Image: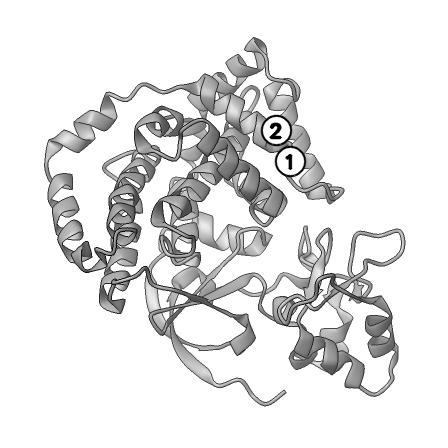
């Protein structure tokens, strides 16, 4: 491959500290997933001169049905294993023997996700990577942003389209405003998410009716509302509905990855199940969930940026709220993930010693690994929210409230 030119990009500070844990990784990205290969990489592999590594790779490749340029083939795991056959001692033998240029786009870029919005690049990371999760969730300065130089393949950049009628400048202002809402530490994380949803609801009303040019006025109006006590007083008066939260989340847990869990995933999933007292919904398990919610703030006191940084990471990484058909649809996806993640964290707080910051980070990582990349979970969550009327903010607020 020709050298990849560097381009200016917006980066959270934690991404500049990232270095693959390699053989020390407790949950390698080469295991437990269907690893796909783009068409160009498939052709590169087959054009390489014969060697043990090249021959092993070509033998493991199987064409996707249907095949696209992005997902042209996939790598069959080693026999009797969940791992890519090229994983040796925690390291990719193709990378070691042939260099990074030979890798497929996904293998070369993960856990990095690069998006282009209005011709401006931004790069975040998936917290399904244990090391990325540790760096992003615990550091107080993880989400200081900087302009950096990024060498990224064109095939690894996801272009995000602008809603009709919105200028590039307005889109970037919306992104910045959404990040500011998530940082509003004078209110609880659930309330920040609620404010984000209320804003997305109003933004959707404009962009779906061709009024994208009105967005600067909406931003000014919403900022003005936030300086008045009315909105926050109204949120304070929202009554939580833990029964609805619990019913939703336990139903969605069945939508997660069907792949056998790795040892770290199995340990966390067992801890979550034990915290809830079993998998079936009942008054007893609901009471345990409520007990965990009560103790969760004490656990989070030792990791005070964890929930905020999780939300910041998802909002930034996904070019929120522009990476779905509407801003509200994007918000519903984010809200569903937040609710299920909160159940995971609460389940680890039900009884006994509170989880350490490292255990909380591990819980986020496993949640992301098992659910966040799973299309079945995403589709089931959307359907569940719509069936309950939770794609509208009024009915959703009690579900968001802790």
Residue found at the far bottom of this picture: 2
The answer to the question of whether label 1 and label 2 lie on touching residues, with beta carbons closer than 8 A, is yes
The image quarter containing residue 46 is bottom right
Q: What residue sits 24% from the left and 27% below the top?
A: 235
Place of residue 243 in the rendered image (x, y in percent of width and height, measured from the top left): 47, 17
Circle 2 SS class: helix
The image quarter containing residue 269 is top right
Residue picked out by circle 2 = 272
Place of residue 12 in the rendered image (x, y in percent of width and height, measured from the top left): 39, 62
Q: CA distance from mark 1 to mark 2?
A: 6 Å
Q: Is there any visible trace of residue 367 in the rendered image?
A: no
Residue found at the far front of this picture: 209
* Left or right for 57, reference 68: right
Q: What residue sits 56% from the left and 37% below the top?
A: 380
Q: Few, some or many C-alpha atoms within 10 Å of disc 1 (few <14, some 14-19, many ≥20)? A: many
Instruction: Identify the mark at residue 268; answer none if there is no mark.
Output: 1
* Left or right for 203, reference 293: left
């Amino acid at each position: 491959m020709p050298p990849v030119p560097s381009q200016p990009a917006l980066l959270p500070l934690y991404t500049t500290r990232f270095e693959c844990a390699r053989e020390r990784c407790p949950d390698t990205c080469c295991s437990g997933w269907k690893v796909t290969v783009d068409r160009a990489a498939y052709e590169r592999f087959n054009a390489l001169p014969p060697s043990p590594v090249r021959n092993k790779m070509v033998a493991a490749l199987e064409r996707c049905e249907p095949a696209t340029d992005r997902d042209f083939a996939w790598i069959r795991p080693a026999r009797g294993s969940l791992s890519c056959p090229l994983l040796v001692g925690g390291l990719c033998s193709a990378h070691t023997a042939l260099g990074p240029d030979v890798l497929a786009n996904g293998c070369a870029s993960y856990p990095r996700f690069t998006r282009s919005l209005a011709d401006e690049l931004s790069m975040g990371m998936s917290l399904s990577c244990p090391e990325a999760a540790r760096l992003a969730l615990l550091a107080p300065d993880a989400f200081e942003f900087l302009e950096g130089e990024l060498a990224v393949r064109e095939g690894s950049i996801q272009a995000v389209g602008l809603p009709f009628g919105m200028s590039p400048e307005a889109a970037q202002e919306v992104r910045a405003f959404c990040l500011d809402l998530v940082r509003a530490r004078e209110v609880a994380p659930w309330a920040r998410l609620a404010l984000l949803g209320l804003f997305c609801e109003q933004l959707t009303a404009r962009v779906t009716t061709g009024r994208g040019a009105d967005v600067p006025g909406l931003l000014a109006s919403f900022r003005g509302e936030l300086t008045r006590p009315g909105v926050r007083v109204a949120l304070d008066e929202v009554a939580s509905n833990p029964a609805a939260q619990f019913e939703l989340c336990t139903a969605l847990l069945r939508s997660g990855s069907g792949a056998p869990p790795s040892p770290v995933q199995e340990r966390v999933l067992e801890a979550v199940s034990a915290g809830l007292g079993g998998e079936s919904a009942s008054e007893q398990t609901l009471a345990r969930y409520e007990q965990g919610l009560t103790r969760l703030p004490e656990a989070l006191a030792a990791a005070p940026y964890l929930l905020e940084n999780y939300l910041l990471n998802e909002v930034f990484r996904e070019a929120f709220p522009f990476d779905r058909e509407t801003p509200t649809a994007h918000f519903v996806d984010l809200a569903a993930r937040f609710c299920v993640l909160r159940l995971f964290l609460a389940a680890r707080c039900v009884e006994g010693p509170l989880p350490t910051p490292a255990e909380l980070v591990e819980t986020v990582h496993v949640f992301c690994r098992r659910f966040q990349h799973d299309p079945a979970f995403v589709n089931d969550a959307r359907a569940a929210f719509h069936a309950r009327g939770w794609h509208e903010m009024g009915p959703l607020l009690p579900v968001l409230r802790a």
